[in-house]
Image (cartoon, grey):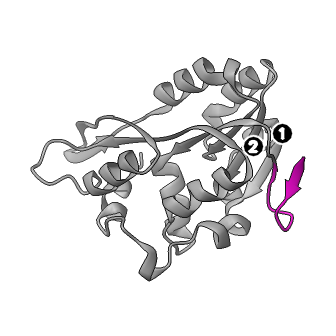
Amino acid sequence: MTDSYEGVIWLDHDDRTALFIDGPNFHGSSRDMGFDVDYQALLGFFRERTKILRAFYYTALDVSGEHTPLKPLVDWLSYNGYIVVTKPTKEFKNGGQRRVKGNMDVELTIDMLNLAPHLEHVVLFSGDGDFRRLVEAVQQRGVKVTVLAASDVTADELRRQADQFVELQSFRPFIQRRPESSPQSEDEEEGEMGNRL
């Protein structure tokens, strides 16, 4: 049985499904739209409507200082149903300016390809065009792929490759964090933006 939620997304109750969240990309898009994501509501939405095998969250962490702004969010996610995949950021100087970089594309790609034989549906939370070939490879293994991202920052080639594209703005009512519902850290924004390169 396939359901449509006010034209937002189709999900099959019997599909073995996995979520792959590109943390900096997804957070940056929601922040640009002026809202914070309620990750508990996000996971709950999919758990109620399909068979969730895994929910991955990818982000790089700046471990150079004593206080890492993303740490509270990462801890919360790992205790509340997400598999959090992290690695340390790398610092470099460009024209005397300090830059911090942390790209998780390889980690996300490996996990998705490894899990693909056990899935019918993948939901990718990213508009990064670098994932187009990954989406194609997973589709060739018989897996449906939904891309959920902001249309204005989603690469056209990724949008065309996906079986379904879901506009983040239309999905916002299901995952927007309400002030009273948040166990997640207010430092999340600062940390994510620091890793968004």
How much space separates mark 2 and mark 1, taking CA atoms?
Answer: 6 Å
Looking at this view, is 186 or 48 the one in front?
48
Q: Which residue is mark 1?
A: 163
Depth check: 57 or 15 in front? 15
Up-down: is 180 above or below 177? below
Query: Residue 137 placed where, x, y %?
Result: 73, 20
Q: Residue at position x 67%, y 61% from top?
A: 168
Which is more N-terminal, label 1 or label 2?
Answer: 2
Q: Which residues are magenta?
A: 1-11
Q: Amino acid at mark 1?
A: Asp
Callout 2 crowding tier (Cα within 10 Å): few <14, some 14–19, many ≥20: many
Q: How many marks?
A: 2
In terms of image quadrants, where is residue 51? top right
Q: Residue furthest bottom?
A: 180
Label placed on residue 12: none
Q: Is residue 178 left or right of residue 14?
A: left
Horizontal arrangement in the rendering, residue 195 relative to residue 128 (left or right): left
Quadrant location, the C terminus: top left
Which residue is at 86% across, 55% downward? 3
Which residue in the structure is indicated by mark 2? 146
Residue 173 lies in the magenta stretch = no
- Residue 56 as seen in the image, left or right of residue 96: right
